[in-house]
Amino acid sequence: MPSAPTRHRVALVIALVGVAVSAFTWHVASEIKSDAGFTSFCNLGGPINCDVVLSSRWGSFLGVSVAVWGAVAFAIGALLAVPGALGIAAPLADLALLGLVGGSAGFALVLLAIAFGVLHHACLLCLTLDGVIAAWAVTVVPLARKFATAPNAPLLSRRTTANVVVLLGLIAAAAAGTFDAMRAPVEAETAADVMAADPKFAAAWERLPVVPMQEVLGDARHAKGSPDAPITIVEFSDFECPACGHAFGDLRDLAKRRRDVRIVFRHYPLDASCNDTMPQTLHPDACRAAAAAECAGQQNRFWEYHDLLFENQRALDRESLFRYARDLGLDIPTFRTCLDDPATLDRVRQDVAAGSRLDIASTPTLFINGRRVQGALDHQYWDLALVLEKDRLAHPGQTTSAGK
């Protein structure tokens, strides 16, 4: 099998670019998960939002960031391309490289389908990686033509073998990615089920502090769901906070599919212009967005406006706030008067004061029947948490064995 040093050299360079992009993507994903106030440069609002994609449960595979998997795959691919780049014929290395590229392409297709079909958001960093993988495939797959076509050639040197390896790599990675993406969350109906399924989560949940609900609710104005629902989730949130945007999707889903849950929203903008506890402003548009939501609420459209703000977190300037009001058919003169009225921000400050009394320092902070959760729960834990809370209501004064 003849070597193809130019093609191998290009494949090596592309793989190294892939390592760099993957490493940077992993850095951004780590910042998003560790810092509630972090907003990535590729969170452009609307459907272009890396933060939503990278912080979702589909941002990892087998518990490891997809970006880390990408960096490892590209690094291995770079090593496999080295012999050919040096003009050394290495059919086994080329076979492995072909399989790796096929697998990378298959996994990328699954992630693209999830981003657009499930999350309805695009991640610019992820799309960049997809572009690198596409360029890698265009460069590497033609190496299969360098393999022998003679029927008496060694099996590992045949073109048919090379083509099959590419196809198997693509199918295997796509199947693995699809299986991981579609696996159902753990189903549990009792606290004992939760203990059996995830004892670490059950133990951690029991250790969270519980605050009396009257202190959490106070004079909250915005709620959806039945007042008689056994589970009340109070969220102190910031419309410009990326982690709050992540929580927003899960809470909206809960409100749609569970009649036993009531959602209460309270403002806590990380913006010193209406939050005196902030030494510096992290989110400069957050107070104005909160006031705009109050004005939409004045016209009985708080929740619809709330959704628009979270869906467009990078566009919270005054002009955009009026555009969302027009999109909802609000009375614009009334909306403008309300937005410019200092009393509107005073209503936001009432929530901030309530949050301060509860020692809130970051967003989102959730109280699930009074149990304090700092930050957003991962998607797969919501139903488990609700099972534990309903069990606590049914058996007051008791704890799971994890909490004893």
Image (cartoon, rainbow, N blue to C red):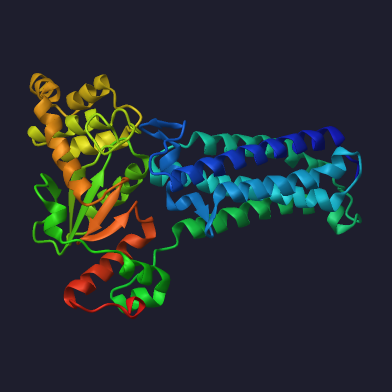
In the image, 113 versus 230, the foreground residue is 230
* 283 is higher (above) or lower (below) than 384: above
Up the image or down, 318 lies above or below 348; here it is: above
- Quadrant of residue 298 within the rendered picture: top left
- Percent of width and height locating residue 11: 75, 37
Quadrant of the rendered image containing residue 345: top left
Residue 402: x %, y % from top left: 36, 77
Is residue 2 toward the left or the right of residue 399 in the image?
A: right
What's the residue at 89%, 50% (across, down)?
150
Q: Position of residue 117 (x, y in %)?
A: 41, 44
Report whether residue 149 is seen.
yes
- Of residues 8 and 344, the one drawn nearer to the viewer in this rendering: 344
Q: Is residue 403 above or below residue 295?
A: below
Residue drawn at 58 percent across, 39 percent down:
24
Query: Quarter holding the C terminus?
Result: bottom left
**What residue sits 50% from the left and 44% below the top?**
29
